[in-house]
Amino acid sequence: MVLENIDAAYKQPKSEKIEDKIGNKELPIWDKMPEIVETLKNNNRLILVAETGSGKTTQVPQALWAEGFAEQGKIFVVENRVAVAVEIAKRVAEEMKVKIGQEVGYLTGPEKKSSRRAQIIFLTSGVFKNIIREDPKMEQASVVLFDEFDERYLLSDIGLALVEKAQDQGSMVKFGLMSATLNAQKFSEHFGGAPIVEAKGRPYPVESHYAADSISLYRMPEKSAELALSIHQSSSHGDILIFMPGKQEIKATIDEMLSRNITGATILPLYSELSPQERHRVFEKQPGRKIIVATNIAERGLTIDGIRYVIDSGLVRMNEYDPAADTTKLMTVPTAQDSLRQRQGRAGRTQPGECYFLITEDEFNHRPTTTKPEIMRTSLREVVLQIKAMGYSREEDSIRLIDSPDKKNWQIAKNQLRLLGALDPQNEAKLSEFGYKLSELSCDPREGTMLLRGCEMGCGQEMALIAAIRTSKRLLYRPQDEIEQADAAHKQFEISNLSDLLNLANTYEQAKRMNFDSRWCRKNYISWTALREVQQNYLQLLNQIKKLGYQINQDKATPEIICRAMATGFPDKIFENIGRGWYRNTTTGEEALLGRESCVSGDLIIANELITIQTRRGGELPLITLATKLEPTWLNN
Ligand code: CDP
Ligand code: MG
């Protein structure tokens, strides 16, 4: 439908009807609200593009609620970040003057607060995937809003494809895509001419500055610290937000500032591994000017009140899956223009702002316009498994993806599933009974296989913990300048030289014995948030295997049995020792270095985690970061 028609059809501004008690009507999005509401009343899809800070995330769900959408079912808002789902839900509850967890709730893996009668629910795409799997027709929902859809995370692409599928099959559920930088035309065409509502206008102007010359990654912390200090000295007010690619650079930037004896400011790091309390400090009032140094966690979604200056390294740490080698590359890469604009938009949300790009204007103009969708840079094992489990037979065509990876990548995923025994040998379009069971688990099919086989072998409980560890954030951290202290601390938790995962499981058990005390965690270089995530995932997996009818046993859980169970998930990841720390894959011949932090050695090992890292000189190094020892006799069972 064309916009003019909507305007003509609905001359009466509907905003008068919307209850006065909700929202913040000053925000620019309210000018378009009648159009947004009417479009969604008359269509089952909507594409909404409006500037960051205009009020999409906080206002649209409230307006739909006020217009009675919740009477038909819940209003789901799918977020890409736990922190955004949590903070925004709290904000919306506050604006609606209700208690968080009642009418307005949030559901994320590690943190949740919601009730049966919640009508607006902010949730992560992972949680949404589980919900739509249980309820493929989405009978419980009236509308699903995909927020910041331009980020194109794998699970939001899949979630959206499944909602479209539900609509095709007669479901009444509606969906909306929300973004500040989406190519509305492209998505409208993909969804058969879905109506677009566009709201132009940033709440406040942001002036851009560019670097005169290129700056290397190595010098970013120093440069940004210098710039932050000169802003701090020359301007009287306004907080500063600095974007760095990772934790390491954040720490270096903070150290640079501290070494210059800065006064009258509070310097705060912000990255996803911080505990919710630590994270929340950036939203609270602090003595003096706030200088926040963040990863791209702060790029979108969140409003940090008072930010007037943004300093952007123009870099991001990103994973890129290499299907041929089945490894993930961890890279620091230049951010695309959509990201640069989002970061710039962090200033100007509550006042006019300034953005200092630490790249030249020419570099800016030559950056790709959009970030590569995650589905194009990830393993498809889990995608294929989930799609097949929902009864769709040909993963390439049965659900319509906006961007579909290479045929080759699908094929590799299918080969891996076949190897794990997840496909029906008579008809590979279908899952085997074992494959269906795997699809019920909230972990990668590799970890799922070792978990279910572990149950059969008498070590289900241990394997559930190990699978939970592999599904969560990294448990141990090794700060660049404290590597020796960290390694020494981690050494205490080594109980075996058979598997790094056994030692991680022991680390978790010890932390649990300490009641996850955060000071103890910090002293031992263990991530508190990762521990909580492991705990959640562990309980979830135990429930899932119980539901599948498995005994949660540990009667035969010797280290050897556990290692044998581990091998079942990695039949194609067996490496032989070729000397000087290097190993060779016995099937593919590919070579990799065993990481120094691994406790394992021997003639034959399983690579439980294999990544490619960038070396200082810019080369690439395949590295086995988690390994398990293997005896040749363990393979024949
Ligand atoms: O989603 P979008 O970027 O369009 O904006 P939003 O998250 O709905 O926030 C809209 C506006 O609400 C922001 O520009 C802030 O002015 C205000 N806000 C705030 O002050 N504090 C929050 N925690 C959230 C929003
Ligand atoms: Mg938003």
Image: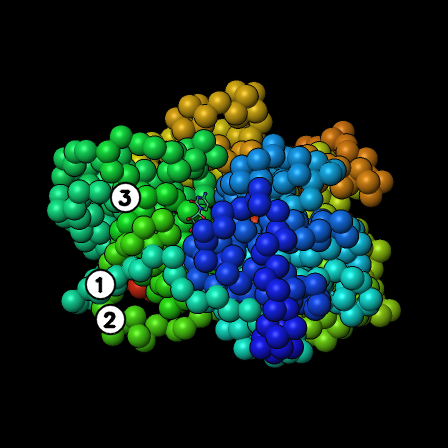
- Residue at image coords 28%, 54%: 353
One can see residue 609 in this view: no
Q: Nearer the viewer, mark 2 or mark 1?
A: 1
Secondary structure type for disc 1: strand
Residue that badge 3 annotates: 239
Can you say whether 157 is above or below 305 in the image? below
The residue drawn where x is 69% and y is 57% is: 143
Which disc is residue 179 wearing? none
Instruction: Residue under label 1, please give it.
Output: 209
Mark 1–mark 3 distance (CA, rounded to whole Å)? 17 Å
Label 3 residue SS? strand
Q: Are marks 2 and 3 in contact (CB under 8 Å)?
A: no
Q: Residue 358's spot in the image, x, y percent?
A: 24, 60
Amino acid at the residue labelled 2: Glu
Toward which corner of the image does residue 384 lie, by quadrant? bottom right
Q: In the rendered image of this protein, does residue 289 appear above or below residue 141?
A: above
Residue 582 horizontal side relative to residue 324, left or right: left
Please tell me which of labels 2 and 1 falls first in the chain: 1
* Real-space Cα separation, disc 2 to disc 3, in angstroms: 24 Å
| 233 is higher (above) or lower (below) than 313 | above
Image coordinates of residue 533 in percent, x first then y, are 57, 38
**In-front residue for pair 248/510:** 248
In the picture of the structure, the residue carrying the numbered disc 2 is 361
- The kind of residue tagged 3 is Asp
Locate residue 549: give its quadrant.
top right
Residue 8 is at least partly visible in this image: yes
User: Does residue 513 lie above or below 477 as drawn?
Assistant: above
- Comparing labels 2 and 3, the label whose residue is closer to the camera: 3
Q: Nearer the viewer, residue 514 or 121?
A: 121
Question: Which callout, 2 or 3, points at the residue further toward the start of the chain?
Answer: 3
Query: x, y (%) of residue 515?
Result: 55, 21
